Structures are given as C-alpha cells and as structure tokens.
Image (cartoon, rainbow, N blue to C red):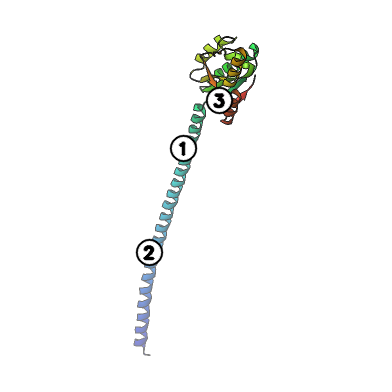
Amino acid sequence: MSSTGAMRTNFQISGILRWFAARNILIRKLSCQVTILALASLSLISASLAENAKAQRSTKAHASAGLAAKTNAQRSTKAHRLVIQVDQNDPAVMNLALNNATNVIDYYRAKGENVNVDIVTYGPGLHMLRADTSPVQDRIKSLKDYAFPGKIEFSACGNTKEGMEKKEGHPIAVLSEAVIVPSGVVRLMELQEKGWSYVRP
C-alpha cells in the first residue's frame, strides 16, 4: 500500500473514530438524561405512593374513629333491660324490688342512658300488684312516672290471678299500672331468652 493509500485509510479510520466518538458522547449524554429522568420519575412515584399510603392510613384512622364513635353511640343509646322477680307476699321483698328498680334507673340516668325494668309477680308475690292488698301501691304509681324516659312495667301473672279468684270466690282487680301476662314464670323465661338481666331480691 502506498503512503497516500495509508493516509487515506488512516483518514477514513480517523473519520470513523470521530463519528463514533461523537455518537458515543451523544449516547452518554442521552443515557445520562434518561437516567436523570428515570430517577426523577421514581422519586415522584415514591412520593405519590407515600402520599397514598398516608391517605389510606388517615382514612383507616378516620374510619376506625368513626366506627368507635358509632359503637359508643350505639352503646349509649341501647337500653339496658332488667327483669325483677317477686314471688313472696312480703312487704320487705316488695320494697326491696322497688328499691332495686329505682337504683338501676338512677344509675343509668346519671350516665345519660336508658333502662327498661319489668317487675314480674306471681304466686304470693301477686299481692304486690293487687288493688285490694298491695302494701306498695303508692310507690308503684310514683315509680311509673319517675322512670321516664326509661320504662318500667309491672307484670301480673294471669295463672296466679285466676287461681286466687277461684280460691277467694270473687274477681281480683290489679293496679292500673300493672299488665296481666298469661304466666309470670313464662314471662321471666322469655325476657331472659331475649337477653334481659335477671334479679330476685
């Protein structure tokens, strides 16, 4: 090869190298820009994911707080229920039953909560609700009004009333505050099956 040919070859190689060098610089610049763009995108995505996670935690916290508030509201609006049994013709037992009812009403009233009370009488305890023999009828009348906005009921056993009427030979009247139920014992059972708390003084 002549020196002119060698020069031409060197020139061509040098041109090719310059072409590759320029492309190489361009590729490096482009690669650097792509890397910066990718890092910036990753930063934005990470920030967005962090913000979403924070929002979800906040939503869950609000939902939990809302659920807790709802549960507390339900708990405070849910009426408590108590059934009290009276099966003795004893003024002390009758007064104790009325005291229990009054104390429960006072306790929940102070907490801003309602309570429903049912005093169920049967057997000799029916005398508590008889118009002619009740030693506590004045207290029953005042307690009926006192319980509001809660509720107090006085349930008189229909079976016991019928038995007393047969034995005594005349109709028996119960107090106007009382409700006659078919059976005092069945009434106690059914209320307890519905979740009422039970007390026997």
Three-letter residue code for mark 2: Leu
Mark 1 surroundings within 10 Å by alpha-carbon count, few (fewer than 14), some (14 through 19), many (20 or more): few
Between label 1 and label 2, give the one nearer the viewer: 1
Q: Is residue 163 visible?
A: yes
Mark 2 surroundings within 10 Å by alpha-carbon count, few (fewer than 14), some (14 through 19), many (20 or more): few
Q: Is residue 15 left or right of residue 121?
A: left
Decide which of 154, 79 is in the foreground and name it: 154
Q: Name the residue tied to disc 3.
A: 81
Mark 3 surroundings within 10 Å by alpha-carbon count, few (fewer than 14), some (14 through 19), many (20 or more): many
Q: Position of residue 5 (x, y in %)?
A: 35, 87
Looking at the rendering, in which quadrant would you find the C terminus? top right
Question: In what element is the residue under mark 2?
Answer: helix
Q: Position of residue 187 (x, y in %)?
A: 57, 25
Q: Which tag, 3 or 1, sits closer to the chain's start?
A: 1
Q: What number is the disc on residue 30?
A: 2
Q: What residue sits 55% from the left and 25% below the top?
A: 81
Decide which of 51, 110 is in the foreground and name it: 110
Q: Name the residue tied to disc 1.
A: 62
> How many numbered badges does the structure rendering display?
3
Q: Is residue 184 above or below residue 145?
A: below
